[in-house]
Image (cartoon, rainbow, N blue to C red):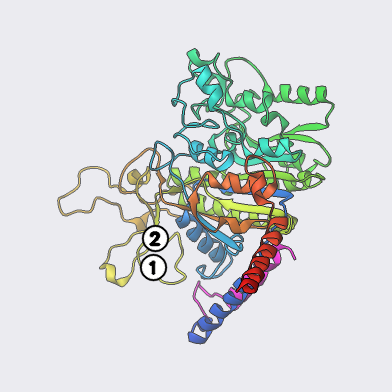
Amino acid sequence: MRAISLIVLCAVVFHSAVVSEKLQVVRVEDKNFWYEEGKARIRNQKEKKRIINRAKNVIVFIGDGMGLTTVTASRIYQGQLNGETGEENYNSYDLFPDVGLVKTYNTDRQVPDSAGTATALFCGVKTKYSTIGVDDTVTTSECDPEIYEGAKVDSILKWAQDAGKLTGLVTTTRITHATPSAAYAHVMDRDWECDGEIPEQYRGCLKDIAVQLVEDSPGKDLNVIFGGGRQQLGFGNGDSSCERTDDRNLTTEWEQLRVEEGVSHRFVTTRGEMEELQDEKKVLGLFSYGHMPYDLERETGPEGPPSLVNMTVKAIRLLQKAENGFVLIVEGGRIDHAHHDNYARLALTEAVRFNEAVAAAVQLTDSDNTLIVVTADHSHSLTMNGYPDRGNSILDFAYDESDEGLIYETLTYANGPGYNTHRKEGPIEAEESLWKDVTQMNRNEPRYRHFAPIYKDLETHGGEDVAIYASGPFSHLFNGVFEQSYIAHVISCAGNFGPSADLCNSSISVKSASFLVMFMSFLVKTLI
């Protein structure tokens, strides 16, 4: 049975009795209710079985910046969008059979960035802040040719390609941004997305990220590439994030390479063009000049960009025709960007869409042969605080009667540009509050900034552990607390490719071990 059946069944068991009127709980949550809820979950847990088949397919979902507060808040938000109180809701991945915690620090930073964490996730090696696809021996933002060559590390996409699998990469950010580029590029500075960003003295030492995508393995061998970043590849001039000084149009060069290889291919720029894809062996979809728009601000027609769900579904359908299986990375990258700007509504909406993409992947695949991993690269400084009533809008106030008139938001940030949104202008009297009356602010706008007590142009990441959820072959290896670099090794093990491939010969070794245990037990009893 597909994993989606388990998710649907549990969702029905745990909150089908919930109906809502003005977000109020109407079910009777007495002791009998909670006894039955607990027993139902135990029965479900007891039925879990370890799947020790080889993973023919692997899908890795990265919610960029999706720390545990974001997971909780977006779960409630989605439930409330569906007319429930929200707290009783479950994300599609919440009910995956195996869950763990991941330590996210970089080798040189207590609180990490996406470049170092993505390198750990995809390459199995922890590294420095802001560096991509290289180990800790490099110096950030500098390039020594000898050190650079020795520091390069391969990713799960390269391991999979070497094993004959199809590969894909989907993101809502620029395809050359920190997280997706760690799956194919090797640079000492995440900002080196195009040649104009590399210091002149290092341009002969290495290629920019966009060129590595088009010219070098594993980027050039990807079967599906969906995301933003036309600017970085020299297709037009609609974004200020990067400027190519070499006048190259890498999308044209990509198409020409495919012609020379004799492989069917297509470059697309709209949702409508993407939906037309059928049997192409290599596809490149760049749907914006920079990052793709937030889902709440996305043009939804065929001439606009696709959603994360659209891209995920199309990528899986293109890749699952592979006889030898596939490996797909999917990033919900704009959760992170919204948090940096203290846009809580946008961040939660992006997290809800990410959850929907995971649910779609579960429906399209079989848990017997497909390992699905859902995690984050790092957290954010978002907090969920106060004592709001059950069913209170997660984007509303945490005020209750014990606060003696103080009104504040349930979701706040430790720092960020929201400081200026909330601080009063002009001189402040000695007994006067520093902050504006939040009840008088227009809080329904998608780009309304939630409160932050310390000013920063961009809010910072958080350094606490993030969660990982897994379903499918060898998903039980993700139970526990472990280093972020461990994730790539489990994928290598489960998929039978890469440096840890030989560690999951379980279909034979487990039976052999069981026989050996019984045989030794028999010998001991006989000797006694």
Instruction: Name the quadrant of the N terminus.
Output: bottom right
Of residues 498 and 58, the one drawn nearer to the viewer in this rendering: 498
Residue pointed to by mark 2: 410
Coordinates of residue 111 in the picture (x, y in percent): 40, 43
Residue farthest front in this picture = 527
Q: Which amino acid does label 2 sit on?
A: Thr
**Residue in view at x 57 percent, y 35 percent:** 182
Residues under numbered marks 1 and 2 in contact, where contact means CB atoms less than 8 Å apart: yes
Q: Is residue 380 above or below residue 239?
A: below
Q: What element carries label 2?
A: loop
Residue at point 57%, 62% (across, down)? 94
Where does residue 297 sit, x and y in percent of width and height?
57, 46
- Give the image location of residue 57, x and y in percent: 72, 49
Residue 149 visible? The answer is yes
Circle 1 sits on which residue?
388
* Cα gap from disc 1 to disc 2, whole angstroms: 7 Å
Residue 13 lies in the magenta-colored region: yes
Foreground of the two, 261 or 81 = 261
Q: Give the range drawn in magenta.
A: 1-26
Task: Specify which label sits upstream in the sequence, 1 or 2.
Answer: 1
Of 11 and 440, nearer the camera is 11
Looking at the image, how many numbered discs can be counted on the residues?
2
What amino acid is at disc 1?
Answer: Pro
